[in-house]
Amino acid sequence: MFKSAIETVAKFTRPIHTLSRKYKSEAIIPGAATLFFVNEEGYAITCKHVIDVLINANKLDQQYLQFKMLRQHLSKDEKYDDNLMAIEKQFNFNTENIVQIKNTFIDCVDTMSGYTWILHPKYDLAILKFNDFKQRHYSDYAVFKKNAGDIKQGEFMCRLGFPFPEFTNFEYDAASDDMHFTNKGMLGSPIFPIEGMLTRFLVDDERAFGIELSTPGLKGQSGGPLFDKDGVVCGMQFSTKHLHLGFDIMDKEILVDNGLKKVSDYSFMHLGQCIHVDVIKSFLAENNVRYYEEQSKSMYNFVLTK
């Protein structure tokens, strides 16, 4: 049902790869998020909480660099451990703290001077702009639903993103107590679609700001597009909510490997939540970002909106 649509949407949907590390740990935790491009000028859409990770990564990196400089100047004497503990307390570091986060954008543009962002004042939505690039590595951009009234309860839709970070091109350098991306290992992760039925609209102040689906949006798909069978973008995945169904089972005996075992189960329904297309288009228009929308169901007539 979504075969052609996925091929279309994959042309402008890209991953953000993330590395994180806890204090005094050499273990690197890979993660991912998603963005999708809305025009040829390097403008993309993602979640506000994804931008928060990018902002926090820069702050953590600078903080950990300051910590390492102070640690480096400690005298290796009998007071070293006490002095180190004092610095750890100053920075509020313990083994449960994330002290480093590093991010990289995959197959977006060739080079850039940096990126800027605009955060939505209310919803989990952000505009991300890649600055001063020479060549884009995405081959298409989103076409948005023109008439949101055509989106109906019971319709099947699909989301695309990168929920399973299988990339392995990273390493920890003990000498510098730092982690970084490398050119060795698996460089990417497979794009992953997940379908769902439109169950309800999310309403705020009598306005639909979101779309709820019968299946969860997976971790790593945040910022990914929601689209119909024609590949027309109808929203953006931003969260999953968990509804308790009340079908709880307590200490029920079941037969496992020819023996009785007591089990308990608490059932929940996991429902994906997506920002509504009208909210996205309004946010783009308010910030003078051009976007394209469909004009008919039979063919795409790109409408330039300023």
Image (tube, rainbow, N blue to C red):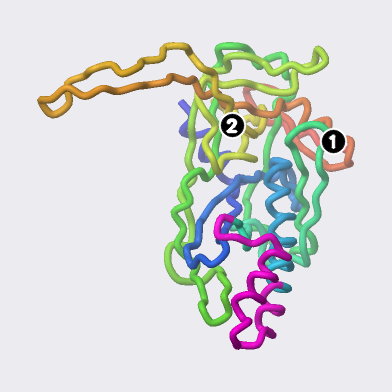
| Position above or below: 280 against 40 | above
Q: Residue at x 29, y 23 (%)?
A: 263
Q: Residue at x 65, y 28 (%)?
A: 274
Q: Residue at x 86, y 35 (%)?
A: 285
- Residue 19 position, x and y percent, is 56, 59
Q: Indicate yes or no whether the magenta region holds residue 233.
A: no
Using a 10 Å C-alpha cutoff, classify the residue at mark 1 as few (fewer than 14 neighbours), some (14 to 19) or many (20 or more): few
State which region is magenta. 67-96
| Position above or below: 66 against 203 | below
Residue 228 visible in the displayed image? no
- Residue 36 position, x and y percent, is 66, 44
Say what secondary structure mark 1 lies in: loop
- Residue to which mark 2 is pinned: 231
Residue 237 falls in image quadrant: top right
| In the image, farthest residue toward the front | 78
- Residue to which mark 1 is pinned: 121
Q: Amino acid at mark 1?
A: Pro
- Residue 58 position, x and y percent, is 73, 62
- Secondary structure predominantly adopted by residues drawn in magenta: helix
Residue 305 falls in image quadrant: top right
Q: CA distance from mark 1 to mark 2?
A: 28 Å
Residue 215 visible in the displayed image? yes
